[in-house]
Amino acid sequence: MKIYEKIKAAPLGGLTKKEITVAFLGDSVTQGCFEVYRVGENGVDTVHDYDASFAYRFRSIMNLLYPDMQVNVINAGISGDGTENGVARIGKDILEKNPDLLVLSYGLNDCFGGKDGIGRYADNIASMVKQAKEKGIDVIYLTQNCMNTQVSPLITDPFLRTLAENFSAVQKSGVLGEYFAAGKAAAEGEGAVVLDLYPVWEKLIVSSCNVTELLSNKLNHPVREYHVYVAIKLIETIFGV
C-alpha cells in the first residue's frame, strides 16, 4: 500500500514532520457508539465515546509507534448510516479531504434490506472504492462484527427487547454474512484491500461463546476492547502482515 511506503520513508529533516491522513467512513460502530438508551416513547440514542472508537485507537497506537509523525484521522462514521448515503456523501466527507487511506466499513444497517438488498450494497461498495482509488487513495474494506444471537436478560425495556429480537432474527438468518461476502468481492474487484474480521465472530459463535455479551448495547455495537483489536489489525493490514 502506498501509505505504508509513506510511513516507512526516511524521517524528514529540520522542522518538517512526516504526515499521514486516514479517513474512516461507516456507521455507528465507526463513529464510536456503544450503549443505547431510550429517548421518548419509541426513540433510541447511543452513548458516544469517540476516543474509544477504532479510528482514534488507531491514531493512539500509531502515535506510540511513530511519535515524530503527524497522524491525522477523519472519522466520518454516522450512526444509522448505510452505503446508499455513503455514496452520496463520500465526495464531501472524504474525497475532498484527500486522505492517504480510506477505511470503509458498512453492513450492519444495510443488511436489514434483506437478500434483495445485497446487490445494491455490493454496487455501493464498489462505487465508493472506485471513487477513492481514482483519486489515488488506498482503501481497506473492513467487515464488521456480528449482531446479537439472543435477547440478553439485561435488556428489560419492552421496546429494546423487540429490537433485540429483530436483530437476533436477522443475525441467525445468515444474511449479514452474505452482505459481507458480496462486499468483499466488490471491494477486491475495484482494487481495495480487505480486512475480513466477521469470520472471527462466526468462529466465536460456533465455539459456544456468548457473543451477545461482547456487544456493549447487546444489539450490534462491540465493546470498547474490540476497537483496540480492530485498530491493531488495521495497522497489520497496512504493514502487509
Image: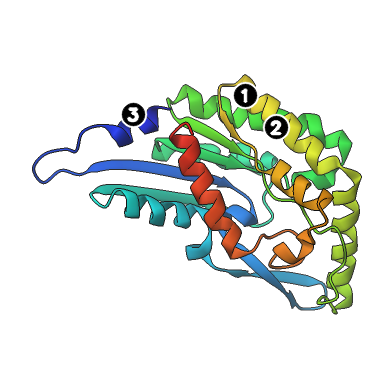
Identify the mark at residue 188; answer none if there is no mark.
1
The vertical placement of 129 against 110, above or below, is above
Secondary structure found at label 1 = helix
Q: Which residue is mark 3?
A: 5
Residue 130, horizontal then vertical, whole percent? 56, 24
The vertical placement of 201 against 48, above or below, is above
The amino acid marked with disc number 3 is: Glu
* Residue plotted at (64% across, 66% down): 34
Secondary structure found at label 3 = helix
Residue 203, horizontal then vertical, whole percent? 76, 46
Q: Image quadrant for the N terminus?
A: top left
**Number of numbered discs on residues:** 3
Q: Which residue is mark 2?
A: 183
Tell me if I can see residue 88 in this picture: yes
**Along the line of sight, the residue nearer the viewer: 101 or 237:** 237
Secondary structure found at label 2 = helix
Lower position in the chain sequence, tag 1 or tag 2: 2
* Disc 3: CA contacts within 10 A as few (<14), some (14-19) or many (>=20): few
Marks 1/2: CA–CA distance: 8 Å
The vertical placement of 190 against 164, above or below, is above
Question: Dots 1 and 2: beta carbons under 8 Å?
Answer: no
Marks 3/2: CA–CA distance: 27 Å
Give the side of residue 66 with respect to residue 21, left or right.
left
Give the side of residue 139 with respect to residue 22, left or right.
right
**Along the line of sight, the residue nearer the viewer: 178 or 197:** 197
The amino acid marked with disc number 1 is: Glu
